[in-house]
Amino acid sequence: MMLRRINSDGALRVLGTLALLGMIATVWLGLFVTPNAVGYADGTVRLLYIHPPLAWVMFVAYGMATLSSLLYLWPRTRHPRFDHLAGASAEVGVVFTGLTLVSGSIWGRTTWGVWWAWDPLLTTTALLFVLYLGYLAIRNVPGDPETVARRSAVAGLVAFLDVPVVFFAVSWWRSLHQGPTVNLATGKSYVHGSMAWTLMLGFVSFTLTYIWLMAHRYRLAVLRDREGDEGLEAALAERWAEAVR
Amino acid sequence: MLHDAVLVCRKDLRIELRAKIGLNQVAPFAGAVLLLFGLALGPSRQALEPAAAGLFWVAVLLSAVLAVQRSFAVESAHAARDGLRLSGLDPAGIFLGKGAAIAAQLLVLEALLTAGVALLFGARLAGGIVLVSSCLAASIGLAAVGVIYGVLSSAARVKETLLPLLFLPVAAPVLLGATKAWDDALAGRAGSSGVWMSLLAVFAVLYVAVGTVAFGPLLEDT
Amino acid sequence: MSGYTEAGYAIVLCTLVSYAVSLVTRERATRRRLPPPGSTGIDLQPPRGHSNLERP
């Protein structure tokens, strides 16, 4: 199983090194090497190398969380592993959603002159952020591990199902009542040459970073789970000793 | 399943009729929200009338949180939840019954609030069919999401704060769709609200289906 | 340059680095509280107490 291989210390270390190198290269190329494209406000084009990769990782992370929730709910593949995976992926996803919002907001400030525009993508992302904060909150509700896992899996599915509904609702809302909205993706047609390579590198290194973070979060969840179990066993052993005495 | 749903729904509504929490607390709360909106947006009719639809639905959403909380407070008192779980009723039936009871209460509340909006904000009620059918679809959708999240959060000690955090973002499309449908209807453009009506219908069908399937495992041992 | 772009890069990088550091330190702390399971890596066997999840 892929998970087990990634989880070995050595592979994870290699992955982390690659992700770190990729990030350094992306930042170096993005901030200092690539040209300042015409048609953009001063230097803003450089945000293009991190904003789309951040948004991409966000979708991958939520997709992974949803897939794991489904696998957990499916009786044949029900295993605590998928619960930990869903939680780990969603938490990393929330971090990346926050960063997507911040970088998008800065983009908006330099390009449109406002920190926030009621753009469909932006609004959907903001709602997604709140939705998954709620999901993480419900994961923290204490209870029997199996119950918590099942509860979280359903909450994860309910949250994910809302995403397309929200997106279409917000798109109609904007398209029916205002002129064409500013599309964050319009910049893409200007991407070429060294810029295209930098953007590609950005996608790869942010994805590697996501996998590394998620693997570590997953290991933390497994360790915490074991800690809880062993604490329980120690308490039980104590009670037994008392009873026998 | 339907038989069980009717049983649970009648039980919840009977409790509600006897305790009158909805009438004595939730409805006045909704009225207070409307009054506060009026104070916040100033006394001029020009500001209030265009915003009437949005304010109406925000008031409905906030009251729906209270209605859902009340519906599960009834179950957690005297461990009635265990009784419900052990009653042998079909979980899907319990879901539909509780949802129907909440939807019925929301509809009554919406009728009262409609009168409030017309009275306080001077909204001219037009396009009656759109108003009524959007209320119906939105109430069903809100009730379905409310029951799912109600049972999810009822196990938590912090349910008073957890439920609004879970419920309100998911209900955002309902707020959007119902507000736009009402906007169109009140402005005499009832014909152009089709897309919003279908959004409300899709939302209601989606979450009723999810709840019917997922309620069994959730009820088992939360 | 306006400074906004650099601020954006700085926020993104700082957040990711501090999240990574917090994950690693939390993992270390938890591992220290646990007795060593015998091997160096952690085993991915389901923790005990979940036996009712296993299919026969």
Image (spheres, rainbow, N blue to C red):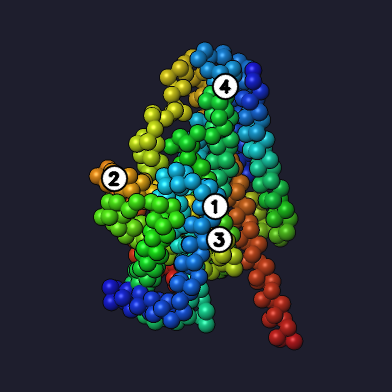
Q: Between C45 and A91, which is closer to the camera in this rendering?
A: A91
Residue ID for mark 1? B39
Q: Is the residue marked by circle 1 packed among few (<14), some (14-19), or many (20+) residues within 10 Å?
A: few
Residue B59 visible in the displayed image? yes
Report helix, strand or loop for mark 1. Answer: helix
Q: Is the residue marked by circle 3 packed among few (<14), some (14-19), or many (20+) residues within 10 Å?
A: many
In the rendering, at what x and y percent does residue A207 appear? 53, 35
Q: Is residue A240 above or below residue A18?
A: below
On-image quarter of the N terminus of chain B? bottom left
Is residue B88 left or right of A111 when viewed as pictured?
left
User: Are labels 3 and 4 assigned to the same chain?
Assistant: no
Label 4–label 1 contact, CB within 8 A: no
Q: Between B218 and B131, which is closer to the camera in this rendering?
A: B131
In the rendering, at what x and y percent does residue B142 appear? 40, 59
Residue ID for mark 2? B188
Q: Between B213 and B6, which is closer to the camera in this rendering?
A: B6
Report helix, strand or loop for mark 3. Answer: helix
In the rendering, at what x and y percent does residue A208 appear? 55, 35
User: Are labels 1 and 2 assigned to the same chain?
Assistant: yes
2 or 4: mark nearer the eye: 2
Residue ID for mark 4? A44
Of the residues shown, which amino acid type is indicated by label 4? Thr
Of the residues shown, which amino acid type is indicated by label 2? Gly
